[in-house]
Image (cartoon, rainbow, N blue to C red):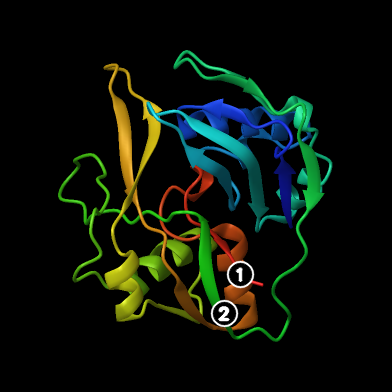
Amino acid sequence: MRIYIDLKNRPVSYRFLDSVHAALITGMVEAGIEACELIGEAAQNWCFAAKGYSLRGGDCLLKGVTVSAASEQIADRICVLDPRAVRVASSNGDRFDLSHGVLRKIPERLTAETREAMFMFASPFVLPEKKRGSGKTRYLNSLDGVDVDAALRRSLERRAGRPLDIVFGIDRLSLRADGMPRIVRYRRMRNGRDQMIDAFSLPVAVKGTPDAIRFAYLAGLGAKTRVGFGCPVVPH
């Protein structure tokens, strides 16, 4: 299940992607979804994408939000999500609600026979650096020399809890033309600094079983999918 909250008639501004996440959690809990299904170690598989563009000075204009759920528990409830309940008043300064949004169901883009697809990204995907010891997680700022197939498949299989018959590929021309990261202002940290995350948005070819491709499409790709990264779309 995928839904879209359309804000084209009344866009709202925000500064941190984390605020959009917090507002969605509020709305989804009011729609009857348990908080533990949305956040934390036991969370179900879902992702979202904030549609809009950056403004001068660091703010962003939100024109719509896509919410995608690979979990049946979440999918059953997001179709009755009330945009008026999607709101936030955060200590980071972001304050907004999506009361003027219109909820729309997104038509299915994949069929039961789909074994190949091209994914674009409504929200850019993030790949973590290989961890050394117990240090904090850092994220790649370049795809040079990176086995993207292995990286995307590893994170997807971890969230699926099983091996998946799926492979990912990025052609060299796309890598050269669109391989630079997009810097996303994610959240305000306790030390008062803004956490910026490098993320990538370039076409990814996908081959595999229909179930695996559909799971990747609904659950998202890469790291931090539940907080607004890695939401794929299939071009018309």
Q: Residues within 10 Å of mark 2 (few under 14, many from 20)?
A: many
Q: Which residue is mark 1?
A: 234
Say which residue appears at 27% left-offset and 49% top-offset: 139
Q: Horizontally, is 218 left or right of 194 in the view?
A: right
> Taking 223 as reference, is 100 left or right?
right
Q: Position of residue 230 (x, y in %)?
A: 48, 55
The mark found on residue 122 in the picture is none
Compared to residue 30, the image places residue 211 above or below, namely below
Give residue 170's position: percent from left, percent from top. 37, 76
Q: Nearer the viewer, residue 133 or 202?
A: 202
The residue under the point 58% across, 75% down is: 212
* Position in image of residue 91 (x %, y %): 47, 13
Please state which of residues 132 and 84 is positioned toward the viewer in this rendering: 84
Relative to 113, say whether 224 is above or below. above
Q: Amino acid at mark 2?
A: Ala
Which residue is at 51% across, 44% downward?
228
Name the image quarter holding the C terminus. Answer: bottom right
Q: Is residue 213 visible?
A: yes
| Circle 2 residue | 117
Q: Residue furthest front?
A: 56
Residue 70: image location, x then y, percent: 65, 58
Could you say whether the residue bearing mark 2 is in a helix, strand or loop? strand
Q: Is residue 21 visible?
A: no
Circles 1 and 2, Cβ within 8 Å, touching? The answer is yes
* Residue 202 occupies quadrant: bottom left
Name the quadrant of the N terminus.
Answer: bottom right
The CA distance from mark 1 to mark 2 is: 7 Å
Q: Residue at x 53, y 70 (%)?
A: 119
Secondary structure state at the residue bearing disc 1 = loop
The kind of residue tagged 1 is: Val
Q: Is residue 116 left or right of residue 100?
A: left
